[in-house]
Image (tube, grey):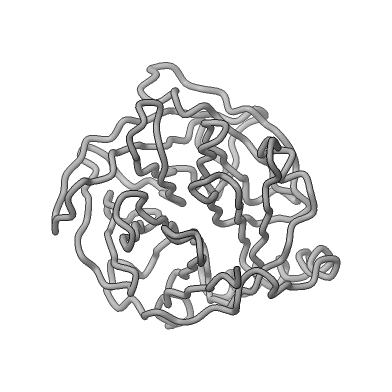
Amino acid sequence: MGTRITIFFLFLLGLSHSLFAQEIPVSERYFSMGIPVDTLKNPRLEEVSGIAFSHIHPNLIYVHTDSGGEAAVYMLDSLGKEIGKIILKGLKNRDWEDIAVGLGPDGKSYIYIAEIGDNLARYSSVYVHRIPEPRVIQALIEEKAVSVELNYPGGARDAETLMLDPLDKRLYIVSKRDKKNNLYSFSWDQFGNKEEIKLDKHLEFPFSSSVAGDISKDGCHILIKNYFAVYYWIRKEGESLTETLARTPISLPYVPEPQGEAIAFSFSMKSYFTISEKRFNILPVLYRYPSKK
């Protein structure tokens, strides 16, 4: 997207977002303002659009790039330093937009990569790919992914948010370009199914342009962000995810980024991290937001 178009789009988004944001002022009760951790200088990582923390290795971060980037998941330490990458054999990066980490039906920990970007709503199907988390960190790892092909009720749409709920054993996708974003899901046991799976639609959010999200590994905390805000929900005991997300969210601290499209809870769940794509010659900065609890 050209610079002028990007600025105009963000201006319009800012106008539409401001009405909802005015209703829920930013709260610093739960998390502090972001602290810069490191600037990513590798040109291959200028278009990071997804971030997730390992559930096996406490300080390991997974990131990936979006449309046209390498079909790979890059591994960073908690200070943002590159330590390796995982190549997904036989795949191309049509438009990878988010990543999640969590269990699968067999009890093993997996990395889930969402090929769900569709700016022009032209693809009849989108995909989520799954690879096992590496037990040993190496500079170069190759994995064959298991995938699921998905379609939306009502036709194609753009999305950039993938979340895994360990409590109800479903993966959730949030649409981006609707005036009110929609929540969809599918069961985590659908991977490897040769048939196309129709997503279940659940609810509409009172905000637009969702670009990233995460659910904590205990399933009790949920984050969704757009370009201007980070929204946060605390799940009550016995509550379904859709019941939680139907409530008005808490607005968390957020350092403005040129095009921030990634967010994740840390391994310890005592902080969340964000990172932007490179825009306006501003290199991506990894931010950490410490918990106050």
Give 279 or 137, whichever is nearer the viewer: 137
Residue at 54 percent of width and 29 percent of height? 186
Q: Quadrant of residue 67 in the image?
A: bottom left
Residue at 58 percent of width and 75 percent of height? 4
Q: Is residue 59 left or right of residue 5?
A: left
Give 180 or 230, whichever is nearer the viewer: 230
220 in relation to 5, above or below: above
Give 268 or 120, whichever is nearer the viewer: 268
Most extreme residue toward the top, as rendered? Answer: 195
Residue 79 x, y percent position in the rendering = 33, 74
Residue at 44 percent of width and 69 percent of height? 277
Residue 8 x, y percent position in the rendering = 66, 72
49 in relation to 94, above or below: below
Residue 122 x, y percent position in the rendering = 53, 39
Give 97 or 272, whichever is nearer the viewer: 272
Q: Quadrant of residue 75 in the image?
A: bottom left
29 in relation to 250, above or below: below
Image quadrant in which the C terminus is located: bottom right
Residue 95 x, y percent position in the rendering = 42, 49
